[in-house]
Structure formats: structure tokens, C-alpha cells
Image (tube, rainbow, N blue to C red):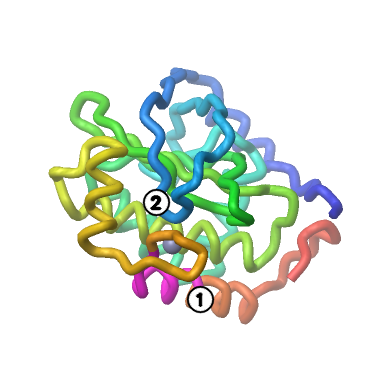
Amino acid sequence: MTRCRVLAPARLTALFARRSRVTLLSVALVCTLTGASAQPAAAQENASAFPRVRSTNPLIVTVLQQASEQSATFSRLVETINASDGLVYVEQGHCGRGARACLVTVKVAGPNRLLSIWIDTRTVDAEFMGLIGHELRHAIEVLSDPGVTNGHDMSNFYQRRGSRSAEGRFETQAAIEAGEAVRAEVRKSRTIASPSFTR
Ligand SMILES: [Zn+2]
């Protein structure tokens, strides 16, 4: 598998001038109930059009921007999170059980709730954007309940609300539909010239 070589626009580097690292302590998988490989996650100030959907990974930052431009559904997901008390970090990570993306944790930090999404960045395409959209929908589900403030709460939340897939993951129809909508919209509008960015 070829690693994507999409580079972040130079202006994005300015976004990383101010750094503040936050260690995400609690880990509880929602989409994948197996233990994902322990991996430190870092939070970073991001003064972009995505004040509450962030990444320390320049590739992911670029993809977030492109997906928002190409998919109205993705844009709405970001806007919904921007209007919440959530700070959602999308970072490179391994979820286990063959899952390419997962919502792994929620924790309280002052007035905010920090949520972490991990995604496998080896292949960046419309599917990749759909996966992020899927997990952003899960983040919105969690953020819709102010009582969900840690991984244990999140697990209970999905046990109450979610349905269990054949792979043993918790799943919601809304997240499935959000991911599918993002994929379809991105595929329809793709005009990206980058040879490393495949459909
Ligand atoms: Zn899901």
C-alpha cells in the first residue's frame, strides 16, 4: 500500500505555531471494543475554520479541509461539533479488529470535552473521508449527552443506544448513513489533481 504524500498547504504550518499538548488518559473504544494499541495522542491549537475538529497530523488537517469543501454532509458534521462543547482530535492510530477508524475516548478538560478519533492514514481516498465523517457522527452522538464525560460513560451510552454489529462493535444507523453520504458526495465532486490522492 502506498503511503499518501499529500502535503499540507504552507499556510497550514502557521496553525502549528502555538502548541499545547494534552495527554489523553482514558481509552474506551466505541466502534471497536477490542483494545487498540496504546498510543499517545497530542492535542494542538488550531485556529482554522475547524476550531473544534482538529489534528496534529498535517495530512489529516488537509483532508479535513478537502472533505468539508467536497461534502456538504461533512461540512455540517464539522459545524455541529463547532457549536458544541467538544474538541474532537482526529489522529493517526490503529484501532484493531480490522477497523480503519474509531472513536476512542472522551474526557473533560475545563469547559470542554475532548474526544479522540483514530484513523489509519495509509490510504487516503473518498473512503478515508467517509470514515472520518462516520466517526464525527459518533462524536456528535456522544456530545449530545452532557453526562458522557469519560470512556466508561461512553461505553454505557452506546450499550444503551447502539446496536452491535456482527464484528462485535457498537454501531448506529446515523453514523453509517453519515459515512455513506460523505463518500458519495466526495466521489461526486472529486477534482483533486494530486496523483497521490486516489478515488
Ligand atoms: Zn461506527
User: Magenta part of the protein: which range?
Assistant: 171-180
Quarter occupied by the N terminus: bottom right
> Quarter-wise, where is residue 106 in the image?
top left
Please determine whether, in this image, residue 8 is positioned above or below residue 176.
Answer: above
Q: What's the mark number on residue 30?
A: 2
Q: Which numbered dot is residue 31?
A: none
Amino acid type at circle 1 is: Glu
Q: Nearer the viewer, residue 158 or 56?
A: 158
x and y percentages locating residue 80 in the rendered image = 29, 57
State which image quarter holds ligand 1: bottom left
Q: Residue at x 59, y 58 (%)?
A: 66
Q: Which residue is mark 1?
A: 180
From the viewer's perspective, tell me whether residue 99 is left or right of residue 140: right
Q: Is residue 91 visible?
A: yes
The Cα–Cα distance between marks 1 and 2, rounded to whole angstroms, is 19 Å
**Image x and y of residue 110, in percent:** 21, 24
Callout 2 amino acid: Val
Please check the rendered image and state whether residue 34 is part of the magenta-colored stretch, yes or no: no
Asked whether, in this view, residue 157 is left or right of residue 101, the answer is: left
